[in-house]
Image (cartoon, rainbow, N blue to C red):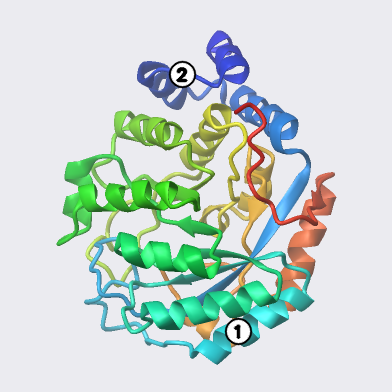
């Protein structure tokens, strides 16, 4: 196991079988986390990049079995921010010191291309890096977002297992989702993707394929989060994904993609009180605090146990800064674009 970790740390390559072996073995977890932390420090440094998250609509046309925003969930209170509300939240994010805002929503077609490109241009006037997470769109839509100034796009593949994906995401095509990722990369976005760990029916071999897919795509950002069963979905009775396994997947992703931006996701902290800090000590270098205000924070419920629902954006900024400083790291002051040192 130690030889495998040394190989990964030096060459940033592992076979599928080697990844499965590391995921299966529990006695070398701390060595894995330490190896990922060394690679993180060497390639992206001790700065932690903060991205201000604006969750601007919880309306979604898709019906994914694991997601609280799914179309058929009648128990959720729906909302949709106006363009001006989005701009106002972004302006406050600038005041809190954020260099990037992440505009995230369900797949809500009421925000057409003209609306989104107008918002993007206004955010760029604030000298912000703009990340979008809007789901599957046409190549023409993505091209329009890029022309307006959008810098990054997040679209998690969720699972590389086509059969499992189409079972859990009824009416959707894995091939189309992958097409979206290729389009985004070809159009010049910094590409973000990722997976859910612990989905019902998922195997360690499937997870290994996920990690190898991230490497194949040469993803610029990879978000790893545990599956958390939502009581208002068809998977209400499913077992949650494990925090420890999610952390291992994240650490292995760092070893294979040493320069990538890897967030310590809030879902990690929903399963472990120190989840984000442990993630930052196992390869992560990004945190995405919520800068959405008021009741909207409580209404964007992908999964139960979401943290910081009653906090203000100012409190979240101060809290996470204190935690970052407490582990000997610092909040980065640049835009946090991927630095491709070895290309």
Instruction: Name the residue nearer the viewer: 144 or 299.
Output: 144
Classed neighbour count for the residue bearing mark 2: other residues with Cα under 10 Å, few (<14), some (14–19), many (≥20): many
- Which residue appears at 61% of the width and 50% of the height? 275
Which sits in the foreground, 299 or 210? Answer: 210
Q: Is residue 71 visible?
A: yes
Q: Mark 2 points at which residue?
A: 14
Secondary structure type for disc 1: helix
Note whether 163 is above or below 141 in the view shown: above
Residue 272 relative to residue 194: left or right: right
Q: Picture coordinates of residue 130 (x, y %)?
A: 58, 66
The number of discs equals: 2
**Quadrant hosting residue 212:** top left
Q: Nearer the viewer, residue 120 or 81?
A: 120
- Decide: is 255 above or below 169: above
**Does residue 277 appear left or right of residue 109 in this picture?**
right
In front: mark 2 or mark 1?
Answer: 1
Q: How crowded is mark 1: few (under 14 residues within 10 Å), some or many (20 or more)?
A: some
Residue name at image x 16 percent, y 52 percent:
167
Residue 118 in picture, x, y percent from top left? 51, 81
Of the pair 335 and 227, the residue shown nearer to us:
335
Image quarter of the C terminus: top right
Left or right of 273, for residue 297:
left
Report helix, strand or loop for mark 2: loop
Residue occupied by mark 1: 87
**From the viewer's perspective, is residue 264 above or below residue 247?**
below
- Whether residue 303 is visible to the viewer of this picture, yes or no, is no
Sequence-first disc among 2 and 1: 2
Instruction: Tell me how far mark 2 sits from mark 1, CA to CA.
Output: 44 Å
User: Which residue is at the far front?
Assistant: 147
Rendered location of residue 68, percent (x, y): 34, 70
User: Residue 121, how many percent across, how many down?
Assistant: 57, 76
């Amino acid at each position: 196991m130690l030889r495998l970790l040394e190989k990964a740390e030096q060459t940033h390559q592992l076979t599928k079988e080697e990844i499965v072996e590391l995921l299966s073995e529990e006695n070398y977890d701390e060595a894995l986390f330490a190896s990922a932390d060394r690679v993180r420090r060497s390639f992206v440094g001790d700065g932690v990049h903060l991205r201000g998250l604006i969750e601007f609509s919880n309306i979604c046309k898709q019906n994914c079995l694991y997601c609280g925003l799914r179309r058929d969930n009648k128990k959720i209170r729906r909302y949709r921010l106006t363009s001006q509300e989005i701009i106002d939240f972004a302006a406050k994010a600038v005041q809190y010191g954020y260099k990037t805002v992440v505009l995230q929503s369900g797949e809500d077609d009421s925000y057409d291309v003209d609306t989104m490109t107008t918002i993007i241009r206004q955010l760029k006037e604030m000298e912000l890096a703009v990340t979008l997470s809007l789901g599957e769109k046409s190549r023409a839509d993505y091209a329009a977002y890029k022309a307006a100034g959008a810098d990054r796009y997040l679209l998690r593949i969720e699972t590389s297992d086509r059969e499992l994906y189409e079972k859990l995401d009824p009416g959707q095509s894995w091939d189309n989702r992958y097409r979206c990722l290729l389009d985004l990369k070809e159009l010049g976005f910094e590409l973000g993707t990722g997976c859910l760990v612990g989905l019902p029916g998922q195997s360690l071999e499937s997870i290994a394929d996920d990690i190898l897919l991230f490497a194949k795509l040469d993803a610029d950002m990879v978000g790893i989060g545990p599956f958390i069963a939502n009581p208002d979905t068809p998977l209400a009775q499913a077992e949650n994904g494990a925090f420890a396994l999610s952390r291992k997947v994240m650490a292995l992703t760092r070893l294979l993609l040493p320069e990538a931006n890897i967030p310590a996701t809030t879902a990690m902290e929903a399963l472990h009180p120190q989840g984000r800090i442990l993630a930052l000590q196992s390869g992560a270098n990004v945190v995405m605090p919520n800068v959405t205000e008021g009741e909207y924070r409580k209404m964007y419920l992908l999964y139960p146990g979401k943290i910081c629902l009653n906090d203000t954006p100012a409190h979240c900024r101060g809290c996470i800064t204190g935690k970052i400083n407490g582990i000997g790291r610092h909040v980065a002051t640049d835009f946090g674009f991927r630095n491709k040192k070895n290309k």
